[in-house]
Amino acid sequence: MRTILLTSALALATAGAATADEIRVLNWQGYGTDLDWAIADFTAATGHTVVHEYFTSEQEMLTKLRTNPGAYDVVLINSAYTAQAQAEGLIAPIDPAKIANFADLDPGLTANADLNPAGALHGVPWTWGLTALAVNTTDFPAPPTSIAVLWDPAWKGRVSVRDDGLEAVQLAALATGQNINDIKDMDAVKAKLVELLPQITTFWGSENDWNQFMAAGDFAVATYWSGSAARSIGKGLPIAFVVPDEGAIGWLDGLSIPATSTHPDAAHAFIDWMVDPDFYVKWDAEGAPATSNSKAAAALPETSFNRSILGDPAVVARVQFMRPVSDENREAYLKLWQDLKAAQ
Amino acid sequence: MAGSLERADRRRAALMLSPAYLWLTAAVFLPLSAMAFFSLLTDVPFGGRDWAFTLQNYRDFFETGTYALLLWKSLKLGLIVTALCVLIGFPFALVLAKAIKGRAREALFLLVILPFWSNSLVRIFSWAIVLRGNGVLDAAVNAILPWEVRVNLMFSQSAIVIGLVHSYLPYVILTAYLALQAIDDSLIEAARSLGAPRRTILLRILLPLSAPGLIAGAVLIFVPVVGSFMEPRLLGGRVGTYYGTAIEDQFVAVFNWPLGAALSFILLAVVLVILALATPALRKAPT
């Protein structure tokens, strides 16, 4: 009896050593991968433990990958940066065969050009979302349909946008009917922004800011992120999320595996766990961005924000996904925005 | 004999001064040198980035009008806030020093210093609650006036000025109070017995004699207000872009530390020049 126990304990120990790894995940804080219950379930199911490290900007994320080779096994990279990370040799191609849920992922997203630099998938599409408008439903009994509402003199002094040059320029590009990733007429964009600034009461910087200003009645209409809008509605703010006819700015986040990862198998297992419908449906109840997994999206309750608004194909068709922005353009946009703000 | 004593004295003095010098080195000299170094680089020298020495960051200030415009705005803001603080603070200090005695003075003094004991962010957010539409001020005015008025000072230059004046007023009150306190009451009595009206006493005795304190207070206010960024950002909204917020953006939002450091040093230089130009006036004022 004792020998049986001993041998089985030994077998367990060796098995544990062979398959239970500690994987290190690099992500924004509070962004899905570090939910306590999800990690606990993952550890219970696979034996792998998860440790997190956080970044506060894309630049910081790239810097950490460059300076700490071997330190990370999974990293969240916005699709606008995946190609850059691949070109610098920071991330390795993904092996879809190791991701059981891969077949359920939206083929439009897995084929996204930015996630497939050099012809190979380098980031598993995980979540996506929109930057569009949200309006106070007490001011707008019927939500507006056009982005022009930001320029409507009736709402002067109750309009807000995020204090971000790139986003402001892309917003003006939408309003002037241009491709946000290939802006041809910068003069029109500039003229539009010059008209926009006097409309604005204050800029917002974070979700928390936004909620406070909206609750105090400072905002009637403001730009907002879809995931944040879902959370704000959940908290009881009287707002409606609007995807204007002119379109909206889309972003796509992927999970990648650093080229120097020491536990690629465990990393693939973790990514598989993260795109699993079971995980997503639970996360959605707490306020999540839209999923890349079609099966997960279909499993959401009818009332879910991500199903009722972002699940509409007509809405998705209007979205312009953000592509990589050259340093030159980024600087030019920032400069334009700074000049306009300074002139106020 | 005398020489060895002197040496002992000197050693003792060095021993007693060393903490102060160590502190100055650690808290002022080192960070400032680091910033001076940063301001001459093309990129931050960590995170494996390539960097080289350049003067481009300083050139940026002169090549684009944006920063000069912002600096001009900030200097104007500094002047307005300083002038208001002096206008409000001096009469207050005068009453405190010459008209009120005993317990009441202590209580008033406490009230003056009280804002210093609260976090500046808390102060700014309290002002936001007071100044916004449907806020405390709006409600109070409408409770008194029979007709409807909409008072919304939030996100305007007025809001920034109100917040800054409230934060920095104690400096001018304290310095002016100390200067006024030192004026011998018999001087005022003598002037009065010679038939001087109140205006003359104020202009010929009180103001000249308390000028050093007032000016010290004004300098203490002017310098931080020109570089302020929190009040403009939180209370100014759309019109809240100033030189201080531009510097903050370089450090926090854009991750361009070299440019932020260069802008800071230009601010330091401009403030020093202004103070240097004001020195002759400062020297002449007292006595």
Image (spheres, rainbow, N blue to C red):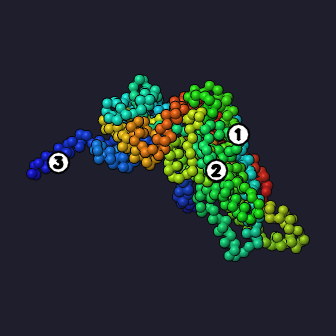
Q: Position of residue A126 (x, y in %)?
A: 42, 37
Is residue A246 visible to us here? yes
Q: Which residue is mark 2?
A: A218
User: Which disc number belongs to residue B250?
Assistant: none
| Residue B93: quarter of image | bottom right
* Horizontal relation, residue B90 to residue B10: left or right: right
**Residue that extends furthest to the bottom in the rendered view of this protein:** B102
Q: Which residue is mark 1?
A: A343
For marks 1 and 3, the one nearer the N-term is 3
| Residue A299: quarter of image | top left
Going by the numbered disc 2, the residue's amino acid type is Asp
Query: Quarter holding the C terminus of chain A?
Result: top right
Going by the numbered disc 3, the residue's amino acid type is Ala
**Which chain's residue wears label 3?**
A
* Horizontal relation, residue A179 to residue B223: left or right: left
**Mark 2 vs 3: CB contact within 8 A:** no
Mark 2: few/some/many CA within 10 Å (<14, 14-19, 20+): many
Q: Position of residue A88 (x, y in %)?
A: 44, 28
